[in-house]
Amino acid sequence: MGLNSALICDARGGEEGRLLLGMRQRVVQRNKEGEELVVLMHHPLHWLMDSEDASDYLRSRARVVISGHEHKASSRLVTAHDGREVLMISAGATIPP
């Protein structure tokens, strides 16, 4: 599922901590047995004004969260409140440097 992390964003790409995921995008259903949810969004969660709420919400539903925007690729496992592990991937970028 793709989410729009640039709802409040200008032509320069916005500023860290000034973007908003918002409540209207919180339509992700909890997984059914045998299903896993992968969420894609342009900005990393820490770029969002509602970062903490968005992070808690996505971690309660998604198994993988993939973001871009920052040019350094990384991945890490985080533990959700229910004890599940969620893979957070920063995909980096394909442009120099």
Image: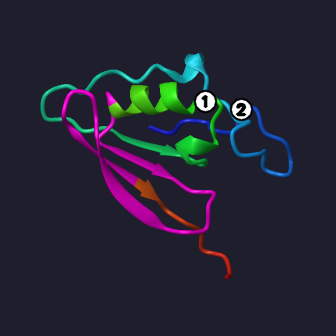
Q: Are the residues tagged 1 and 2 within 8 Å (C-beta)?
A: yes
Name the residue at 20% across, 35% down.
Answer: 35
| Quarter placement of the N terminus | top left
Which label belongs to residue 69?
A: none
Task: Specify which label sits upstream in the sequence, 1 or 2.
Answer: 2
Which label belongs to residue 7?
A: 2
Residue that lies at the very extreme toward the right in this rendered image: 11
- Identify which residue, 1 or 57, lies in the foreground: 57
The location of residue 69, given as percent across then percent down, is: 63, 57
Name the residue at 21% across, 27% down.
Answer: 82
The location of residue 32, given as percent across then percent down, is: 19, 25
Residue that lies at the very extreme toward the left in this rendered image: 33
Name the residue at 61% across, 22% down.
Answer: 22
Q: With respect to residue 79, does 30 lie above or below?
A: above
Inspect the magenta stretch and tell me whether residue 82 lies in it: yes
The location of residue 31, given as percent across then percent down, is: 24, 27
Q: Is residue 13 left or right of residue 34?
A: right
* Residue interval drawn in magenta: 60-88
Q: With respect to residue 43, does 5 lie above or below?
A: above
The location of residue 43, given as percent across then percent down, is: 61, 47
Inspect the magenta stretch and tell me whether residue 86 lies in it: yes
Name the residue at 44% across, 65% down.
Answer: 74
Residue 94 figure quarter: bottom right
Q: Is residue 27 left or right of residue 70?
A: left
- Identify which residue, 32 or 97, lies in the foreground: 97
Give the spatial CA distance, label 1 vs label 2: 7 Å
| Quarter placement of the C terminus | bottom right
Question: Which residue is identified by label 1?
Answer: 21
Secondary element at tag 1: loop
Residue 14 figure quarter: top right
